[in-house]
Amino acid sequence: MSTSSAAQALRIPRALPGAAVRAARAALAPLARAVTYTRWLHLLTGAVVAAVCGLVYPGLFGVRPVQLLWLPVLPVVPLVAVAMVPATRLAEGLQARLLLAPGKHARYGGGDLAPRIAAAPSASRGDRARTALWLVLRLEAGCLMTLLSVQLPGLTGALVTAAAGGTPTPVLGVRITGHHGWYALLAPLPLAALMALVVAAGNLMTAAATRLLGPSAAERLAALEERTERLLEHNRLARELHDSIGHALTVAVVQAGAARAAGTREFTDRALAAIEETGRHALEDLERVLRLLREDGARGPADRPGLADAERLLESARAAGSALDARVTGPLEELPGPVSREGYRILQEALTNVLRHAGPVPVAVRVAVAPGTGALRLDVRNPLPDRADGPGGLGGAGVGAGRGTGLRGIRERAALLGGEAEAGPYEGEWRLRVTLPPNRPARADDR
């Protein structure tokens, strides 16, 4: 025998114990999971209806074995009738989630957080039909699993009794005869078969619940829309946080630079006061956004600043050294809530861009509100900076293209309200013009 053949012969026996251990662990792993036993409990509770019906017929006394065959049949009609009640699907879905698919098992794989089993009342005939089929399936599976859960351990006891020389009672209609010691070796097999059936039946019932109690197409669409709305809301909050903190940091940097250049105590005190005020407002915005991200419903959209609070933006720009010429025409109070709030953020981003890219230069701000319709027109102008990049963070030939992230955010805000935003050089100045037509008439809940 060659050296390699000898080594191969030595490796094979060593590999066998390892493979056997892995196979044994894989076979016994389901027995260490809590979900195996919650599914077993769910299967057993499916026979409760049959047990209740059994108290009526065939009763408790003088029952013949053939009469027990009616137990999985008699409750079918009442169960189908109960399934027509919309709340039945909700109750079954909650119970299936709790026992068949607790925790992470209740979700689809692959990172999809959609529930595998719905917990909602029946909304259609299809939902009621699937619920009826589920109840009948649960009844039959519960009766079968209850029978096996009683009889198979009884078979183990009968084998042990026969091995010990006793007289075992019949199990599943079969009487074990003889007294043989090797019966003791067979005693664990019924228990092993029972646990294998429990695991397999639990998996099958979970798959059936996913099909019969799973979300309908309408429920999946509603869940997708809700998730999309939540993502859009998070994106909006992130954009708000960017605008607020970006504005505060820009004002602070400009103020600090101006104070250092001025070198006077009086100007430095004014600059520090402006930085303190701007930072305080930024902290308020940060706290509000973080509270919303934690889904704290104590504060709603009305807590977000609107154009009625724009004076604090103008004051911070003036404190940074900009000569502001601001004019407001029309009734601000007639602006719909969404238009007022988005207009505030657009003005904040516009002033931030001016300070960031042009410095403390003269700025002309015009805010016009159309009476009756609530349409908003916002116009912000400032001298073009000497260097190549414009207020939108654009450079060179791209000045007119509007590729800056600030301008992109302004355009997105305007587009969400059905408006438009234009930015670029105009008559020797940089001009931002925004039009926000309201999507609907102003309502009390928009305020």
Image (cartoon, rainbow, N blue to C red):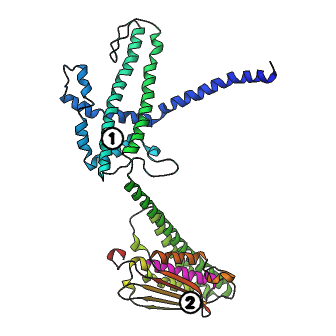
Cβ atoms under marks 1 and 2 closer than 8 Å? no
Foreground residue, 123 or 92?
123
Other residues around mark 2 within 10 Å, as few (<14) / some (14–19) / many (≥20): many
Identify the magenta region: 341-361
Q: How many marks?
A: 2
Q: What element does badge 1 sit on?
A: helix
148 relative position to 395: left or right? left
Residue 429 colored magenta? no
> Image point 48% across, 86% down: which residue?
378
Give the secondary structure at mark 2. strand
- Residue 338 visible in the displayed image: yes
Q: Earlier in the sequence, mark 1 or mark 2?
A: 1
Residue under the image location 49 percent in, 76 percent down? 413
Q: Residue at x 38, y 84 (%)?
A: 374
Residue at (59%, 29%) from the top-left corner? 22
Q: Is residue 352 left or right of residue 284?
A: right
Q: At label 1, which amino acid type do we have?
A: Trp
Residue that badge 2 annotates: 381
The relative height of residue 205 versus residue 334 in the rendered view (above or below) is: above
Q: Position of residue 369 (x, y in %)?
A: 41, 88
Q: Which residue is denoted by mark 1 in the rendering?
A: 134
Q: Amino acid at mark 2?
A: Arg
Residue 180 spot, x, y in % from top left: 44, 6
Q: Is residue 307 above or below residue 154?
A: below
Q: Nearer the viewer, residue 414 or 212?
A: 212
Say if the magenta span includes residue 347: yes
Instruction: Specify the quadrant that holds the C terminus.
Output: bottom left
**Of the pair 303 and 221, the residue shown nearer to us:** 221
Whether residue 255 is visible to the viewer of this picture, yes or no, is: no
Q: Position of residue 205 (x, y in %)?
A: 39, 37
